[in-house]
Image: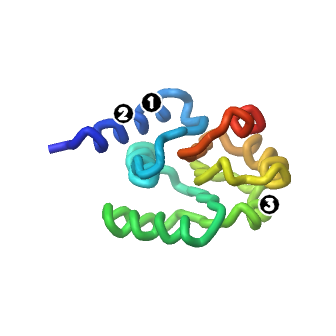
């Protein structure tokens, strides 16, 4: 039986899919944004995925949740925000920007080409300030 958290994760995933698969999800810390992203990936079934993150602790969380929820994609490219500029001209079926609020202005600027070339962009955050929302 699905608990209230899982229900909200599925609802938010469906909302993102229904809204052109583009935008930022601002969900409270510990909501389960990675699991919600796995729900999206299972439904959308992208051929290529780029997941960008601020530090390796976040990458480890993705890897742990992939294992926990038996999701074993072979089509994921991981990159830190510091190395994101190396991927900005590549095309992906889905781009996930985790902890998007931690991107520096320079990283946001280099990300513009990536955003223009890719149509399915999922930004994840739990602490989006009004200033950061405006910049993004």
Badge 1 marks a residue whose secondary structure is helix
Q: Residue 85 carries which label?
A: 3
Relative to the observer, which residue lies in front, 70 or 124?
124
Mark 2 Cα-neighbour bin, 10 Å: few <14, some 14–19, many ≥20: few
Residue, x 59% and y 38% (percent of image)? Answer: 24
In three-dimensional space, the C-alpha distance between marks 2 and 3, rounded to whole angstroms, equals 33 Å
In three-dimensional space, the C-alpha distance between marks 3 and 1, rounded to whole angstroms, equals 29 Å
Question: CB atoms at circles 2 and 3 under 8 Å apart?
Answer: no
Q: Is residue 19 above or below residue 9?
A: above
Residue 20: give x, y in percent of width and height: 56, 30
Q: Residue 127 carries which label?
A: none
Q: Of marks 3 and 1, which one's residue comes earlier in the chain?
A: 1
Question: CB atoms at circles 2 and 1 under 8 Å apart?
Answer: yes
- Mark nearest the camera among 2 and 3 is 2
Q: Mark 1 points at which residue?
A: 15
Residue 1: give x, y in percent of width and height: 14, 44
Q: Mark 2 points at which residue?
A: 11
């Amino acid at each position: 039986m699905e608990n209230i958290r899982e229900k909200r994760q599925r609802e938010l995933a469906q909302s993102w899919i229904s809204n052109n698969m583009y935008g930022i999800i601002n969900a409270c810390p510990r909501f389960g944004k990675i699991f919600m992203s796995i729900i999206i990936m299972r439904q959308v079934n992208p051929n290529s995925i780029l997941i960008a993150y601020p530090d390796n602790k976040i990458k480890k969380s993705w890897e742990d949740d992939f294992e926990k929820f038996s999701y074993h994609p072979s089509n994921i490219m991981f990159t830190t925000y510091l190395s994101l500029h190396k991927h900005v001209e590549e095309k992906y079926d889905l781009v996930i920007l985790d902890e998007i609020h931690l991107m520096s202005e320079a990283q946001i600027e280099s990300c513009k080409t990536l955003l223009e070339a890719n149509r399915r962009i999922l930004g994840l955050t739990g602490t989006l300030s009004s200033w950061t929302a405006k910049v993004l």
